[in-house]
Amino acid sequence: MSKFTSSYTITMKDIIKEGDPILRQVIGVISLPPSEEDKEELACMMQFLKNSQDPAIAKKYGLRAGVGLSANQIGLNKRMFVVYFTDEKGKLYEYALINPKITSTSTTMVYLPQSEGCLSVDREIQGYAPRYERIKMKAYDMAGNELNLRFKGFPAVVIQHELDHLNGIMFYDRINSENPFKLPENVEIKSI
Ligand SMILES: [Zn+2]
């Protein structure tokens, strides 16, 4: 068992920061059904996101608020991530996803005008990171059930950000290096 059990409280010292090679690796799939250890780790990661969004707990532990966390961001070489947030309509997105895979994407794209944030990045980064506006995803839940999910807009951005982590990609890799506010041409893209 790793230390990341459901009774362990993840704090910022557990979060791997940019520059560490594990954030540049393509993370391998895990065997199904997930092990007890995998499930404990996912529960621990999910609790971190909830804690990070709870003002009193976040203050107590000095947590930065996060909406997503991939396993390699706490040093685990496992293809899984968690997300926890509400969209603009108040709908809750709470997913612990194993071996996630994008099965189709829209041709239209979106970007966050205020740039994306990342728990592994402590510096201010400006620029637009283009993302697919809509994605379909196949993944497995903690019980090993296959899920077929659709995400649109902000939720799709969060999911793509986390999936990128499992492929060794940082959000700023997607920002135009010459002009960070330049958007791709010949693509229908809008701010969200
Ligand atoms: Zn990130």
Image: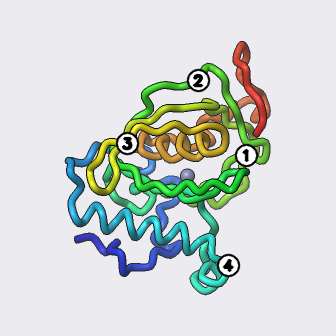
Which residue in the structure is indicated by mark 1?
Answer: 115
Camera-nearest label, 4 or 1: 4
Q: Amino acid at mark 2?
A: Ser
* Of residues 3 and 145, the one drawn nearer to the viewer in this rendering: 145
Which residue in the structure is indicated by mark 4?
Answer: 55
Camera-nearest label, 3 or 1: 3
Q: Amino acid at mark 1?
A: Ser
Q: Looking at the rendering, in which quadrant would you find the N terminus?
A: bottom left
Q: Earlier in the sequence, mark 2 or mark 4?
A: 4
Which residue in the structure is indicated by mark 2?
Answer: 106
Q: Amino acid at mark 3?
A: Leu
Q: Looking at the rendering, in which quadrant would you find the C terminus?
A: top right
Question: Residue 8 location, x and y as percent?
Answer: 38, 79
Q: Are marks 4 and 1 in contact (CB under 8 Å)?
A: no
Camera-nearest label, 3 or 2: 3
Q: Earlier in the sequence, mark 4 or mark 1?
A: 4
* Of residues 39 and 162, the one drawn nearer to the viewer in this rendering: 39
Q: CA distance from mark 3 to mark 1?
A: 29 Å
Which residue in the structure is indicated by mark 3?
Answer: 147
Question: Residue 12 location, x and y as percent?
Answer: 53, 72
Q: CA distance from mark 2 to mark 4?
A: 36 Å
Q: CA distance from mark 4 to mark 1?
A: 23 Å
Measuring 53% from the left and 32% from the top, which residue is drawn there?
Answer: 135
Camera-nearest label, 1 or 2: 2
Is disc 2 surrounded by few (<14), some (14 to 19) or many (20+) residues within 10 Å?
Answer: few
* 13 vs 146: above or below: below
Question: Residue 59 location, x and y as percent?
Answer: 65, 82
Query: Which picture quadrant has residue 99?
Result: top left
* 131 vs 18: above or below: above
Q: Using residue 3 as the reference point, say whether residue 186 is left or right of it.
A: right
Q: Earlier in the sequence, mark 3 or mark 1?
A: 1
